[in-house]
Image (cartoon, coloured by chain):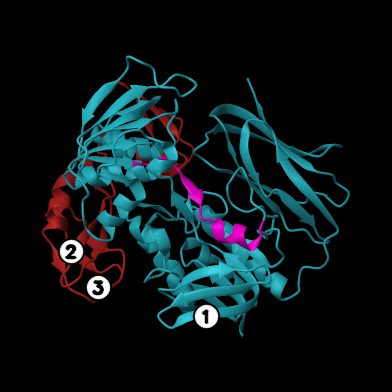
Amino acid sequence: MSKKKLICIVCPNGCEIEIDGDKISGYTCKRGLDYAKSEFLNPVRSLSSTVKIADSDLVCPVKTSKPIPKGKMFEVIKEINKVSIKKPIKYHQIIIKNVLNLGVDIIATKEF
Amino acid sequence: MNKKDLVIIGGGSAGLASAISAYDEGVKDILLIERNAELGGILNQCIHPGFGLHHFNEELTGPEYAHRYIEELKRRNIEYLLNTQVTSISKDKIVTFMNENGIQKLECKAIIFATGCNERTRGQILTPGYRPKGIYTAGLAQKYMNIDGRLVGKNIYILGSGDIGLIMARRMTLEGAKVIGVSEIMPYSNGLKRNIAQCLDDFNIPLRLSNTVTKIFGKDKLEAIELSDVDKNLKPIPGSEKIVKCDTLLLSVGLYPFNAMLKNAGCKVNLETKGSLVDQNLETTIEGIFSTGNVLHVHDLVDFVSEESERAGKNAARYILNKRGKSLNTLNVKHSENVSYVLPTIIKVYENNEPIIFSFRVKKPIKKTTICIKNSAKILLNMKKMNLLPAEMIKITAKDLDLKNSDDLVLEVKEDE
């Protein structure tokens, strides 16, 4: 395995982590270590966007219930943009169940 | 005139946290005033995750962070007004506001001012050229995108590497726009490192450091911009110009406290932060008027706004309930040359002093430092810290400082080898 440097995105501290073979250094918490491992093997990202609300000028913010593979972000956004929902919308209501069979739901982050 | 114990101006993260904490400290006669149609402030348009790691120990989006506070406010039945604009406050603590019921006045025992900050605009950075449409501040574009569902352009350039600009680079890319690049006039980024990684690097969006926009082309609609490298005095270098075609320019060039109303009331201004001068209890130079959150100084993390505002709420309540005793000594806090500001600038010493929380920023990145707080007689606190950046506010909690006979304090950041 080769050397790789990354900036940890788990929290705003932004630790600089170095991966050299199976040696990982520079992280300052367990979440950082987990992030480095995942970033090397299967990078994932949390995704947030908005969906249309029928009969409203406003849009409803949504997010993935869990991080999704980094390479799937654009495809998931496409799915989100197909949807239009009706009021009332509950906090953390599921908007799309198991999007693209990723085992992740799209949920509302606000109530309307 | 109608009376209230406590009026809080602004229903964003700062106002919500201070209302809840004042209530919990024992003041029940509270009115929170919000000018928008909903509570939550700017959190509502910050739909990305990254909030709450300090405060709730989990990662939330802006609307979720706001939701938690709004639920707490409602659980306590704290009174609030929406669609209501405060027009002035006076030094004898009379708040004038207007809404669909007309203009009203309220006399109160204490006021907490929590109105947040404004974005710097094109006028404030003096970009030459025409004034076509297609130039937005990053936060305004974010509001259009995340509240109104409208993407402001297709080929976008971003000036300034502030966090809102970086977040918008990712958001607009995901929604199908082409973000051509980001220019930052300073030799280092002004955003959080993780936002460079997850908003620019993830999408191969180039960041040009020591580079800025020197011309705007397009009479009615933005057509192109001219970029130039800058020297170490931030002056454009002739010959380095490059023309970039784009239909939208986003400005992410900084925020400043929305402090005019406090200034007009007579609260002294801190020239370094552009907010008010406050003591460690977040009290301005007018007794009973408090200031907290981004109207006091611009924060990078909402978690820190909440923490500060909880202190403001608690201290305002203690003031109203006459619980804080007599101040024994007042002293000023100064800082070394490499620090851009420190808060508080005033410390009032009481019989039982709570820990004092100092917030400050450095002027340029420093790798290794020793931070100390001292008076003319001795060093009161000494600590080592790594990787200080201007973009990241630093907070230190100082417990048990013996300040009864102290003279002015100095916060000193020493650069270590």
What residue is rendered at 38% in x and 71% in y?
Answer: B38
What residue is rendered at 55% in x and 56% in y?
Answer: B259
In the displayed orientation, state which residue is furthest to the bottom: B1
What color is chain A drawn in? red
Residue B5 to residue B236: above or below: below
What residue is rendered at 73% in x and 58% in y?
Answer: B354
Pointer 1 with pointer 3, Cβ within 8 A = no
Q: Which amino acid does label 3 sit on?
A: Ile
Q: Nearer the viewer, residue B48 or B105?
A: B105
Q: How crowded is mark 3: few (under 14 residues within 10 Å), some or many (20 or more)?
A: some
Q: Where is residue A58 in the image (x, y as percent from the top left)?
A: 24, 66
Q: Where is residue A18 in the image (x, y as percent from the top left)?
A: 40, 27
Chain that bears disc 2 = A
Q: Is mark 3 on a helix, strand or loop?
A: loop
Of label 3 and label 2, which has the lower sequence position? 2
Chain that bears disc 3 = A
Write down the region rendered in magenta.
B251-267
- Of the numbered discs in the image, which one, if any, rests on residue B413? none
- Of the numbered discs in the image, which one, if any, rests on residue A52? 2
Quadrant of the frame with the C terminus of chain B = top right
**Marks 3 and 2, how far apart in space?**
12 Å
Residue B152 to residue A63: above or below: above
Chain letter for the part of the structure drawn in cyan: B
Q: Which of marks 3 and 2 is in front?
A: 2
B266 is within the stretch colored magenta: yes
**Marks 1 and 3, how far apart in space?**
35 Å
Q: Is mark 1 on a helix, strand or loop?
A: strand
Q: Residue at label 3? A: A89
Q: Residue at label 1? A: B104
